[in-house]
Image (cartoon, rainbow, N blue to C red):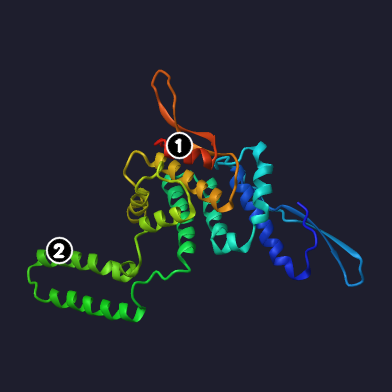
Amino acid sequence: MTLRNIGENEQVSYENYSFWLMSLLSFASGNYVEKLYKFITVIDKNGSQIKSEYWSGRKLRSNRRGIVVIEPHNLPLFINQCARKLTDEIFINRGLNLSLNWYINTFNNNVVEVDFLLLCTALESLIYRHFKESSERLVSTKKYREVKKKILEIINNSRLDINEDEELRKYDIFARIIQKPFDDGSCNKIGSLSANTEKMLDDCGVPYKDLFPKVDFIKIRNTIIHRGINEIDNNFIELRKLSTLIVRIFIVILGYEGKFMESRKIELYNESEISKYGLICVSLEYIFSQAKNGCSS
């Protein structure tokens, strides 16, 4: 990569651009792409060229677990379309940079539950940026604190009338359930995480109904966070579907118009007729056509 006409005050922009480009290449290839060596030519005040070389000496991360989203023969088209969109608006304001980093972190992990939380975090960082410009509070902070104080006072005062130990134990559980949404502020927000996820996907034009008709993967996320594990048999399938959804979001935000790979359920008709997930080459146009025909992944 050669960048020309970079002024002295644009070094930060160059660093951002190169980092974002490496993130895109990591996403596309399923490999960690890192800066190991760079060669810089600058002009000093006397008009002479000064060349400097830099070798980071960084140890490479060797294990690749990421999905090859863009096949090698489609990579030039992908980079040509996306290189001009490496801007603050897309990567910072819309949160693509942070979300890509969470996604890429799944390459170096082999625990399904951890991968699931990493992908959920990638999604939530995009949701946060999407709704950042609009007010998420239903009432002002001052009014919220006033109401919270009065309600918690009622709960605490009502406890004084209870004498039996078992009834008191149950009441304390009830009180914690009531207090929790006030402590985390969730009762003063517009919409749940599921609702906000659907709203963002609809706003951005990301097809998702074939993967999650009800965005019910949020329940799995909550169970893993609160219990440390999700006790169901289809964790891997749900992980694949969530990964597919994240890939689609990135493709839409980047405005890529070409072929890419995504996980789909593939029927293998052998002796045991095993169903498993595999990669197929698709386009957004194809996905939308499948959705109209009522097909699902």
Where in the figure is residue 184, as x and y percent of width and height?
A: 34, 68
Q: Is residue 51 left or right of residue 75?
A: right
- The kind of residue tagged 1 is Gln
Where in the figure is residue 169, as x and y percent of width and height?
A: 15, 65
Q: Residues within 10 Å of mark 1 (few under 14, many from 20)?
A: some
Identify the element where label 1 is drawn: helix
Q: Is residue 162 left or right of residue 222?
A: left
Q: What is the quadrant of the C terminus in the image?
A: top left
Asked if 23 appears above or below 281 in the picture, the reply is below
Q: Which one is nearer the viewer's eye here, 229 or 188?
A: 188
Disc 1 target residue: 290
Where in the figure is residue 167, as x and y percent of width and height?
A: 10, 65
Asked if 11 appears above or below 209 in the picture, the reply is below
Nearest-to-viewer mark from 1 and 2: 1
Q: Residue at x 64, y 45 (%)?
A: 78
Residue 170's tag is 2
In this view, the residue farthest toward the left is: 164
- Number of marks: 2
Identify the element where label 2 is drawn: helix
Q: Residue at x 44, y 57 (%)?
A: 200
Q: Residue at x 78, y 64 (%)?
A: 6
Picture quadrant of residue 157: bottom left
Q: Residue at x 33, y 75 (%)?
A: 139
Q: Which one is nearer the viewer's eye here, 117 or 286?
A: 286
Picture quadrant of residue 75: top right
Q: Earlier in the sequence, mark 1 or mark 2?
A: 2
Residue 45's tag is none
Q: Residues within 10 Å of mark 2 (few under 14, many from 20)?
A: few
- The kind of residue tagged 2 is Lys
